[in-house]
Every structure is written in C-alpha cells, then in structure tokens.
Image (cartoon, rainbow, N blue to C red):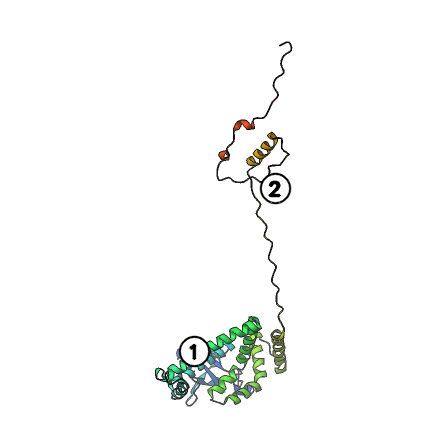
Amino acid sequence: MSVDPGHYLASSNDGQPPLLKLKGIESKPELNGRFGQAVSFAGGRYVVAVINAQGQQDQPQFLKLKPDNLEEATQFDQLKFGARMMVESVKEFARGPKIDEYGNRVIAALPSSLRSKFTPKTALLGCAAISQLILLVVLKVVGRVFGVWKVFVFVSMVAFVLSIASPDIIDGTRAKKPYSLIAKSSARNFGMRCKEQVAQMTGFRISERMALGLFLALLLFCGKVLLTTTPSTPPRPPRPSTPPIPQYDLEYIYKLGFEDATASKEFGASLPDDVRNYNAAVEADLAQPIDQYEYEQSNYEMPYDPQPKAKGS
C-alpha cells in the first residue's frame, strides 16, 4: 500500500503540506467543510490536524480520516479560509487589551476638546472610516489620471499574486511569524505555488520554470498595459442638423397655381421657395378638413368656349 495515496503529506509537496478540506464524515457531520493538514498516513487513514479559524495550534484536534474524506482545497477555498482567519483575528484583536492601547494613541492625537467624546473603540472605528474614505478618493483620482482600465489591471494583478501566495501567508499568519519571514517564504515558494495553480486550473502538470515563465509573460503583458499611453479620442464634430421638410396640402398648392394662372402671373410665382426649388410638396395629414380655406367654388370652374351662333341668325 502506498505511504501517501492522496499526495497530501509534506514529503510529497516539497515540505509544504497542502490545505485539505474535510468532507463526507457521517459520524461527525459538523466537521464537514472544515480545513486541516495531513500529518501522517498509517493503516489506510490520514492523521489530520484540524485547523480552526483563529489558527491557534496550542492544542490542535487530530483526526484519523480515510482518503475519501479529504480533498485538496481549491484556490477559492483557500481564499475563503484566509478571509475567515482575518475576520476571526480582527474579532480576537477587538477583544484583546491592545485595542485600548491603540485607541488611546488615536485619542491622544486629537484636540483636547474632542478627547472626552471618544472611547478607544470608537476612535479606532472613526480612524478606519476616514482611512477607507481616503482610499476611495485616492482610487478615484488615480483612475481619472491613469484610466479606470489601468487601475483595474493593477488591482487584479496584485490580487492574483496574493491569491497564489495565500497558502504561505495563511501558514505564516497562523504561526504568528514576522512579516519579513512570511514575505521570504512566500517568495521562496512562489514558483511551486504557480505550478499548483496551473495544475488546478488546467489539470496539466508543468515544471516550476514553465509556471514562472507563464507568470512572467502575464506580468509583462500587464506592464505593457500599464505603461502604454492611451490616445485621447478627439471629439466628434457635431452633425449638421437637417431642417425638417415642410408639408403642404396639395389642394392649397393647386389653389396657388390656379390664382397665378387667372392673374396671368408666371407659373409658380406664388409657390413657396422650397416647393419651387426642391419639389417638397407632399400630401399632409390635415387636422381640419380641406374646406377650412375660404374660397368661392365658382373661381374653380374651368372656362369653356361658347357655342358658335348659327348662320343667318
């Protein structure tokens, strides 16, 4: 039997055991969805150290689980677990004595007339709200200066790097290591984490050099986007407005022509300019009947030649 059938031990992962997710435990269903790390394998079962959200390891809970009850945590699970650890760490910090110390420092920086109006917790909350507001203003200003698309690319790249290094960040935070050691371990294991990320996303196993090469290509592409100057689009010239085509009633046009003929005027003398030049006469929908025009019907009787008189009369 294999000594590590699921490849969950540290010896199978370059000294860094992966984060495991517990599943399918019928005897204790409350453990399903929790996370842990495999310590050893014997008798067909893994000895798993269950990690609580606070990351405290003074008295870890050890369980013997079958390989079917374990699965390697996805990148999303790792981010969710890291976020949960951050929330619990904030809660633990809020319940600890240091919050009063930091709050008193903030109160000491306020004017003497305002110090009595704040407690240490409210002073820290106000400081956090002001910091968030400043961050939003800075992001808005930077977005206007450099472009929203460039800010989005930069933030996405930073989030991508943090997501790759999240296992080392979580382990270092859980072990309460200094930030410098967490940064060094994250940089040292970054190639391996890139390889694991590619394997989770595509299912292909590649070397660390190839994974780092893909990351470098992505980094160069993002750098090109950030450093390329976006040409400003010239404003479009206003489209010339086309005057509306006037509509005239054909009966009215006929009346004008008839009056010109009876008055021996030149053809089209009384017609509007747009009708005479552009032939813009179309039949309009009249809101009122045609008989609104006041004219005598006798004016429209066609002239006729009288009958010739008979000879001898």
Q: Indicate the quadrant containing the C terminus: top left, top right, bottom left or bottom right.
A: top right
Q: Is residue 69 visible?
A: no
* Place of residue 300 in the rendered image (x, y in percent of width and height, measured from the top left): 56, 28
Q: Residue furthest left?
A: 116
Residue drawn at x 63%, y 43% is 278
The image quadrant of residue 91 is bottom left
The image quadrant of residue 188 is bottom right
Mark carried by residue 76: none
The image quadrant of residue 107 is bottom left
Amino acid residing under circle 1: Ala
Q: Crowding near pointer 2: few (<14 within 10 Å), some, many (20+)? A: few
Closer to the chain start, of discs 2 and 1, is 1
Amino acid residing under circle 2: Asp
Closer to viewer: mark 2 or mark 1: 2
Q: Is residue 143 visible?
A: yes
Residue identified by numbered label 2: 273
**In front of the other: 293 or 269:** 269
Residue identified by numbered label 1: 129
